[in-house]
Image (cartoon, helix red, strand yellow):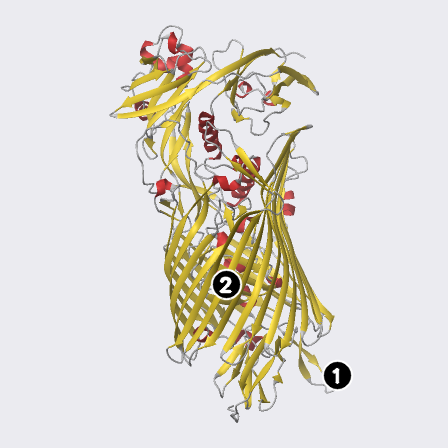
Amino acid sequence: MEFRVLIFSFVALMLAVTSCTKEVKIDIPGYEKQVVVDGSIRVGEPPIILLSSSQNIYSPTDITSYLNGFISNAVITVSDGTYSAQLIQVCTDNLPPGTEALAEAIFGLSIQELQQLPNPLCVYTTFDTQLFGQVGKTYSLTIQHEGKTYTSTTKIEDPKGLDYLQWKPEANNSSIGYLYGFMSDNASTSDNFMWDMKKIGDPLFTKPFGPFFNDAFFNGLAFEFTLYNPMSFQDSTYSENERGFFKQNDTVVLRLSKLGKKEYQFFDKKYNQIYSSGSPFATPINVPSNIEGGALGVWVGYSSWSDTVVCQP
Amino acid sequence: MLGFSFMAQDKHTISGYITDSRSGEALSSAKIFVPSLEKGTVTNTYGFFSLTLPGGIYDVEVRCTGFSTQRKNFDLRKADANYSVELKPFEGEKVTREIVINGKKSENVNSTKLGQIELDIDQIKRLPAFMGEVDVIKTIQLLPGVSSVSEGGQGFYVRGGGPDQNLVMLDEGVVYNAAHLFGFFSVFNSDAVKNVNLIKGGMPANYGGRLSSVLEVNMNEGNNKHLSVKGGIGAISSRLTVEGPLKKDRGSFILSGRRTYIDVLAKAFIPDTSPFAGSGYYFYDMNAKLNYKFGEKDRVFLSGYYGKDVFTFSDREGGFSADMPWGNGIAALRWNHLFSNKLFMNLTSTFSDYKFKFGSKQDEFKIEFLSGIRDYGTKVDFSYYPNDKHRIKWGANYIYHVFTPSSVSAAQDTIVFNTGNAQKLFSHEEALYVLDEFDASEKLRINAGLRYTAFQHVGPFTRYMKGDISKPDTTLTYGSGDLIKFYHGLEPRVSFRWLVGAHSSIKGGYAYNYQFVHLTSLSAVSLPTDIWYPTTDIAKPQKGFQASLGYFQNFFDDRYEASVEVYYKGMNNVVEFKEGALPGDNVNDNTDNLMVFGKGWAYGVEFFFKKSVGKFTGWIGYTWAKTERRFPDLNNGETFPAKYDRRHDLSVVGTYMLSDRWTLSSSFIYATGNTLTLPTSWYVQDQALLFNYGARNSTRMAPYHRLDVSATWFDKAYKTKTDPTTGKEIQVKKRLRNNLAISVYNVYNRANPFFLYVDNDGDFLNGDFKLTVKQVSLFPIIPSVTWNFEF
């Protein structure tokens, strides 16, 4: 796929030399309001569903319009096949103690910002531990909203870990270096992964550029690969030359999550759309939802393997 | 003028070759005419003609564009006659350029050619050139029924057909990618081209393999009289051509080359210390041709083309480097043999190769991608002229295709990643045809033909059978030479001309075609990365028909030509990629598993008005058309407009010979904007903004219009000298001739849409988040100067 990246850069170079860009108002017919599901369940954690609606491309894009897009009157049920329960709404104006960081992660806003919103934001979840994610279980999701029903299922796969993870200093600067992981892939299974990372003590994981991948290219192989530091790009303590590297004595947690094929296809196309948006060479890609009934979005189960590494030679 | 005619039962044949007296090159489409009988014929591509007449004594005229008409009296009462003639150009540059056409003017009405246009390279060279580069493809896009996607889109579209539905040939070798620099220039170097023939409807049976059109580009043969050199130095490229005799009047050669120097110019702006030093782009191409007469009956031609675009990118700091070359290699060996003065044969062997390659390196990680197509072909064509009423052709064609739609290799240090097997597909394509162009009556001429085509997809081949989410994939492997799928069918072709009066006719035609190669694109615009893919057990052959009807009228002693043509085209098994398919999806998979198949149709009416003679020449072409597609698996199965659907397309082209020294020309085009798919809504998932696209091609860009102008200054053709013997001043033709072509592209600086996209900017929390539709335009007003020389 990288050759497309190169073509984009080539065209960007050409366009920079020859082209001009201007805003135009053009008729884009065919808008249809749809429900958007952003749901996930992890091992040992409750299901979390965020429900919103899609907006017309020319609709107002101020924060009020954005927040008004969230749906708070749906009836949502999750089942593991033998046990099911209706989810409750947990809102930003009434967060249970200890869930502030989780709320920040879900909405992308600081807890202060969340508390200042004119209308609270809500997620659908449960405190019923029987519905906390377990490896090997398939979870069904049913959403009822404005007379329509949307359904989906996702399975929490067996987790897959690395053989080792270690830090190696750069040859010309021993204070920084990359992490090197070694993976032995199982040839008999098709595996789909997501990786993210955080510094020890941080509440949130940070996703790298292109966090989702599958084993189509390395099925059955055992190999070492390089991991860069995705947190360094947001961390002002890293200088320009240190971006992408881990500093010596950093302690970081790598999380490698497995997910199903349909769910992977959602994220694969999602990131493709994000990275190719605006390119004339990109085909218009609608991100394929695994929600039945005409909704957008995804319902995904993750099984996670994690490892903590201290960056020392 | 009217010679004495002696009627007799016997018939005799006059035949021969018509050539240019300056260079010895064959003149195609020269007209051989017998005024007393009002009968005639035209030369074929190789300058050969054969005309069988009742025994008698005749004056025979030979006419050709820009050449003095030749007349000769023949006695055909007892024997056949050979009439090979070298036509002399009109004396003096002034006359040559004033009297542009006299040989073909009545062909507009008389021939059965429907939807066919021939252009001499001299005509093309008189039009405004983009950045000084005269371009064959850009010129044919000024004709009704032919359009480009946009600036920067490669290929061209004929009567609603896709770019893969055009058979583009250079000296009979297939050109799979006729574009340099994403379509900004074509691969045809104007100094190496003799003429261009475009068939956009009523395709005769001797052509096949594509649904929409045939673009035949014939290379110059080279001067067999004397050595000559010509070239040009332009703003972004230069070219040089050398031609001369191998042996005077027996054989000749031509060698022509061209190269851009954008990379050289860019170097001046990228210092060696820059992390991007080493990045650049250039293209080059070379044409070469040899021909030799081994006698009166045999002539051999060897033609070759090799061209490449090369883009290199280097980011030293990031440790990233890449190179991306792509291009064509074409070779054609042809043998003309005259079995008799009525039977002409052309045997051709061709080789055609198109490759796109991408290689990159990021630290220790390397990846290489390759795709391409290679053809080995042989064809034989016979032309038989039994009498003055019939012109019969038959022949056979065979092509061995090797497709490499995708070959990827990747490695990290010594670890080689599994990128799937290199996909190679092998196939045989055959055709047999016969056609007869005959005069059913004085008014009715019919060209009827039948073509039989066959196609075999053969092994080795691995078919991936993809299971659904819950089932594993399986494969089916075929051995070398195993027949995987066989297709065959008949393609009837018929066209007619009915003379309504001396200067007008009605023409109609029907053609049915098979096409066994498909070009698939994952992009909104055509790219060198587009994949050629053969017909397989899954990808069925494209099938299509076109019916057209036209009225042709000449005015004022054939100085003005006009025509109106209506057409309807139907296409089956046209190909697109599935919704959301991505380039990496064909790893361990067949590309055709990612394809979907549907139907297409197009209809329209074309108006063409042309003035070919006089100081002012030019044409106006207007097309109203509609082109739609329907795929069960795309756009919810609903009909959608093709991306090159254009309701209105207008071209106005004019050239004015201001004086001996100056020629002015201009062209104006207006076209309805192209369609595209834009997002109708946005939504947020995991804090990422995503778009949801609406119906396919439901948005239309703003119309495209542009005016180009040019002025060409010619130096004096003659210089005055004193004759040493007589002491008188005489006019001597200059050895070195040169001209300066000044052109302005996009005179009124119109910002034409290249593509549109939805741009998001700002931050929700800051209250400045904004979604806007942006239009990107490519070329503003661009003046250029090119100096051309010849000696």
Among the 4 quarters of the image, the one containing residue A233: top right
Q: Which residue is mark 1?
A: B724
**Horizontal relation, residue A277 to residue A200: left or right:** left
x and y, in percent, of residue B496 in the image: 42, 71
The 10 Å Cα crowd at callout 1, few under 14, some 14 to 19, many 20 or more, is few
x and y, in percent, of residue B557 in the image: 43, 80
Q: Which amino acid type is shown beneath numbered disc 1?
A: Pro
What number is the disc on residue B451?
2
The reply to whether residue B235 is visible in this rendering is no
Q: Which amino acid type is shown beneath numbered disc 2?
A: Arg
x and y, in percent, of residue B627 in the image: 38, 53
Q: Nearer the viewer, residue A90 or B384?
A: B384
Q: Secondary structure at mark 2?
A: strand
Among the 4 quarters of the image, the one containing residue A247: top right
Q: Name which of mark 2 and mark 1 comes first in the sequence.
A: 2
Q: Nearer the viewer, residue B467 or B314?
A: B467
Residue that lies at the very extreme toward the left in this rendered image: A147
Q: Nearer the viewer, residue A21 or B112?
A: B112
User: Quick check: B434 above or below A213?
Assistant: below
**Alpha carbon separation for disc pair 2 and 1:** 66 Å
**Horizontal relation, residue B622 to residue B385: left or right:** left
User: Quick check: B174 above or below B310?
Assistant: below
Seen at 59% across and 20% down, the residue is A239
User: Quick check: B302 above or below A210?
Assistant: below
The 10 Å Cα crowd at callout 2, few under 14, some 14 to 19, many 20 or more, is many
Seen at 24% across and 25% down, the residue is A147
User: Quick check: B607 above or below A215?
Assistant: below
Seen at 50% across and 36% down, the residue is B582
Query: Closer to the observer: label 2 or label 1?
Result: 2
> Which chain letter matches label 1?
B
Q: Nearer the viewer, residue B737 or B246?
A: B246
